[in-house]
Amino acid sequence: MKNYWFALPGLLLCILLFSFTSKHGQKIVNINGEKIFLKHADDALAAIEQGALKLSIKGVAIVVFIPGDSTRSWVSKMKVVGLMKKGSSNLLGVASTKAAEMADTYQDSGSGIRPPLKGEYGYKGGLIRKVGSGYIIAVFSGGSPDQDKEAANNGAELFSIYFK
């Protein structure tokens, strides 16, 4: 029987390199997705703002990038479009609950796919889109549900161009 122990270090090195390459490759995709998001987040917020102003509504816009296939972290940016509070409503809080719901369900906010959890209210007006390196969320809060969704769509559409 021959002694093959001399091959063990080489085998372990191959396994280690394969494992590092797989993890490193995934990180590169996520880092590139974050770079694309950060480069264009202000443009997407401006597009949501333009849509809101066209509809004569004021409120809060949020854009989010979730790297990978499941929500473990996100990068986001927010912009106040005229006002952050309306009556007894904190529009930043409302926009945030829409984003939180979508980060869990991977469906547009208020989809009704399940009953709202504590901290969620089932409000419509947020959109989520799958992109190659994760998910993009675009939200507006300040108008009617249909107006919010229309304004948010401007940001989602713009991001879909950058993430192709």
Image (cartoon, grey):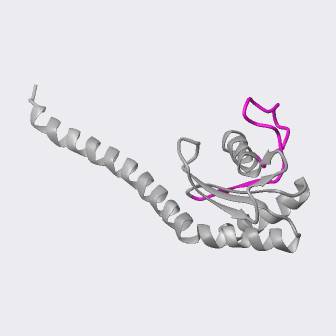
Residue 102 is left or right of residue 162, and the answer is right
Q: Indicate the position of residue 49 as horizontal and vertical percent values.
A: 75, 69
Q: The N terminus lies in which quarter of the figure?
A: top left
Q: Residue at x 80, y 46 (%)?
A: 89
| Left or right of residue 56: residue 12 | left
Given residues 158 and 59, the one toward you in this image is 59
Q: Between 160 and 13, which is closer to the camera in this rendering?
A: 160
Classified by dominant secondary structure, the portion drawn in magenta counts as loop
Does 69 lie within the magenta span? no
At a point 39% along the width and 48% down the height, the residue shown is 23
Instruction: From the viewer's side, name the closer residue of 119 and 38.
Output: 119
Can residue 164 be seen from the camera position used here?
no
Looking at the picture, tell me which residue is in the foreground, 73 or 135. Answer: 73
Residue 11, horizontal then vertical, whole percent: 21, 40
The answer to whether one can see residue 111 in this image is yes
Residue 79: x %, y % from top left: 66, 63
Q: Residue 10's x, y, as percent?
A: 17, 43
**Which residue is situated farthest in the front direction here?**
87
Q: Magenta stretch: give its range.
A: 107-132
Image point 81% across, 63% down: which residue?
Answer: 58
The image quadrant that residue 57 belongs to is bottom right
Residue furthest top as drawn: 1
The residue depicted at 74 percent of the width and 50 percent of the height is 95
